[in-house]
Image (cartoon, grey):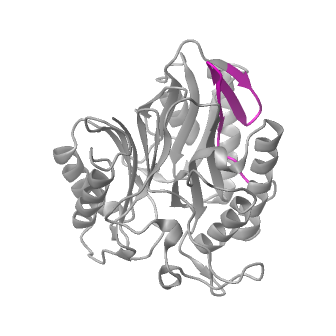
Amino acid sequence: MVEKIQRIYTSTVEGAFEEMLRDALLQVDAAGLIKLAIFNKPADNCEYRKDLATIDKVATEIFGEQIPLTSYIAQKTLHGGVTIEATYIACSDAIVEYHRNYRLITVKGCTELMTGGIVPRFDGGTTFEQSKDIFEGIAKMLGSNGFKPSDIYRQWNYIPGITVLNDGSQNYQEFNDARSIFYGSDKWTGGYPAATGIGTSAGGVVVEICAIKGEKCANLPIDNPLQIAAHNYSQQVLDGKVIEQLNERTTPKFERARLLGDTVLISGTAAIKGECSNYSTDAVEQAAETMEIMDRLTSKENIPVENNGSQYDLLRVYVKRENDIPAVCEYMQSHYPAAKKHYLVADVCRPELLIEIEGVAHI
């Protein structure tokens, strides 16, 4: 596998998006840089599209023609400016092949395909239509490079108005149905990817993937004894009507985590035990339960290879209500001080949930 590390950068100036973006990007170390996830809250869809053009312009000015992969995620940050989560290749012998919206990274016979944010080829449309278009593009990208859908090991899914119902059809369920149709083209004998499905405030659906082939390291799904696997949820916890192409609402197709080499890729995790949500209106209580679930997931006894325990490297904390962030931040810092963390305002996949946390750990 290709060893990677993440670093977090935040803008230190106030002003227009371009000023804040430039300030944050100028802090980014270019050596080994492969991808940028850029977080900021645009006012609306029109501003989101303008920001995309600004990102391309400013990134080209700073990094040259071979700019890193980028994703623009419409979520308000802790400080209200621009936050950048930068991913770096940690091995010096990696060979990188550049393509417009993806990279092929090869080390010792192992090849990874990594994308930036993949968006629909059209404006508007339903969540299902946008998602279907994105997955059709991903299928072509994978196939043209000798990958299968089941080679995907990590996926991020950003969905505007994630729990919104349109004529009885829920946006998150529409996304899950489109994903299930795409995944149905392959056999997933090694389990599904680790994944996050989270809300955004503007733009359309955005998907990022990482896929791998030729790996000689462990590449294993990790279940959680405190939770029912999301892909085994009952119909009772799924929302929205059944679409015409399917006989029932399809489940979210992801694992609670995946182990790749010595890296634990932790899916978006919320205060759900079994398949039932914590209905507390106290965000810190939900954060504590979420971390209890993640601690069990990443415990020495639950990792499917011999190990001496794990340590969190990065935690991305999504908070539904902005005014809960100070208390959640205080709790996370006091209980998990060593991990890099950043906080985002985002809607979560169930209306009653106030917190979702994803992360990276190492055994």
Q: Is residue 328 left or right of residue 157?
A: left
Observer able to see residue 352: yes
Main secondary structure found in the magenta portion? strand
Q: Magenta span covers which residues?
A: 96-119
Q: Is residue 124 visible?
A: no
- Looking at the image, the residue that sits furthest to the left is 334
Spot occupied by residue 120 in the image (x, y as percentages of width and height) = 76, 55
Residue at position x 69%, y 19% in the image: 64
- Left/right placement of residue 229 relative to residue 108 reads left
Residue found at the very far top of the displayed protein: 93
Return the residue nearer the eye: 73 or 233: 233
Q: Is residue 140 left or right of residue 36?
A: right
Depth order, front residue of 270/236: 236
Front residue (pair 184, 29): 184
Position of 70 relative to 278 (above/below): above
Locate the C terminus and report the quarter of the image it occupies: top left
> In x, y percent, where is residue 301?
27, 48
Q: Relative to residue 196, is residue 61 depicted above or below?
A: above
Res 158 quadrant in image? bottom right
Q: Is residue 210 in the magenta section?
A: no
Residue at horizontal 62 percent and vertical 68 percent from the top = 176
Q: Is residue 106 part of the magenta span, yes or no?
A: yes
Q: Quadrant of residue 320?
A: bottom left
Q: Could you say which is closer to the camera, residue 90 or residue 52?
A: 90
Residue 310, quarter of picture: top left
- Give how far across and how far down residue 289 sits, in percent: 25, 63
Left or right of 223? Residue 176 is: right
User: Does residue 320 sit above or below 215 in this rendering?
Assistant: below
| Residue 231 in the image, given as x and y percentages of width and height | 53, 67
Residue in view at x 70 percent, y 47 percent: 118
Please name the residue shown 70% across and 50% down the image: 149
Image quarter (top left, top right, bottom left or bottom right) of the N terminus: top right
